Image: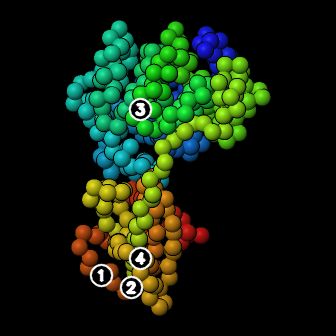
Amino acid sequence: MNHSLIHNKLSQWYEQHHRILPWRETEDPYRIWISEIILQQTRVAQGLEYYMRFVERFPDVRSLASASEDEVLRYWQGLGYYSRARNLHRAAQTIVQRQSTVFDTPVDISDQASIFQELISLPGIGEYTAGAIASFAFNLPYPALDGNVYRVLARLYDCEIAFDTSAGKKHFHQLANQLLDQSNPRLFNSAIMEFGALHCTPTSPDCAHCPIQECCLAYAHHTVELLPVRKPRTALRDRYLNYTIYCTPDMRTLIQQRTEKDIWQHLYEFPLQETEALLPVAAGVAQVDLKHILSHQRIHARFHIRKVEQLPQIPNTIAIPLSSLDDYALSRLTLRALDMLLV
Ligand code: SF4
């Protein structure tokens, strides 16, 4: 495999084709960290709006550390995977407690290993995110393997090992380390990620106009559509959630906070009854039914809308005006139901 040819071709392609995005225009490790966490499991178009709002409200690690978790979750509301926001918040607090300088600029980058170790020791920062911050912010020679990079590597090397197994991760990490352009890891990592996102795409890679086609073993072996390989998916668990949206004549309702270690921890929702199947709807009660897919769960939700003269007494709920729902961090499912009710 001709590594320097790949480096040159990918960097030329990147210069011509890359999208202009705010986290690419900065070397601020804090902003790069925030963008990387937001972009996990989130499309760029949606993530961009959240990123702008988030860094405007929390422009540095200290402002994030001193905010309440509730407020951080409110800025994350609708993005899903809320553990990402909780980990960001915890990591910011850890950095401030340790008096770490890793998110201050300029950072002394002579001790590369300790920067990487400091990053990876923080909540929510794994090998990928640490590699992305180390290379994009400090131009340090660490690979950053996201889904796009796994796909490009699997095809370039015609590798049939499932990339999401521990053996696969190790193998792909070795490949990425070998291929990394040590002289400019920032540019190389940006280029290979963007190339995977825009050119070597999952279902319609443009092999005919590919700048690295001559190096691509999957192209030579006609195996492009078969790659990358994933481990078989585990079955989704079905859950049945029955919510009641109470509404009094003066437009008040009940909400409660999820406190258990479960999905949507610490977010607010309407009073809930979880059952083995959705509960029937009583006569005269309006309803909204929604299906919601999470990474390992399929949620069947029914929202029963009950008009009542007075709110019932339900433990652990709070009574609020419907107009102040925006002040609480709500789950994406609850927001979807509200959107449907307001149509
Ligand atoms: S030839 Fe096709 S599969 Fe190979 S790297 Fe290029 S776009 Fe991807």
Report which residue position mark 4 lands on. Answer: 277
Q: Amino acid at mark 4?
A: Ala
Mark 3 to mark 4 CA distance (whole Å): 39 Å
Q: Which residue is at the front of the view, 201 or 98?
A: 201
Going from N to C along the chain, the mark reached first, 1 or 3, is 3
Disc marking residue 220 = none
Q: Nearer the viewer, mark 1 or mark 3?
A: 3
Pointer 1: what residue?
Answer: 312
Instruction: Give the mark toward the camera: 1 or 4.
Output: 4
Disc 3: which residue: 167
Of residues 125 and 152, which is closer to you in this image?
Answer: 152
Q: For the residue with label 3, is its CB less than 8 Å from the closest atom of ligand 1?
A: no
Q: Position of residue 97 (x, y in %)?
A: 21, 30
Q: Position of residue 254 (x, y in %)?
A: 34, 72
Q: Quick check: 102 above or below 253? A: above
Q: Which residue is depicted at the point 32% across and 71% down?
A: 319
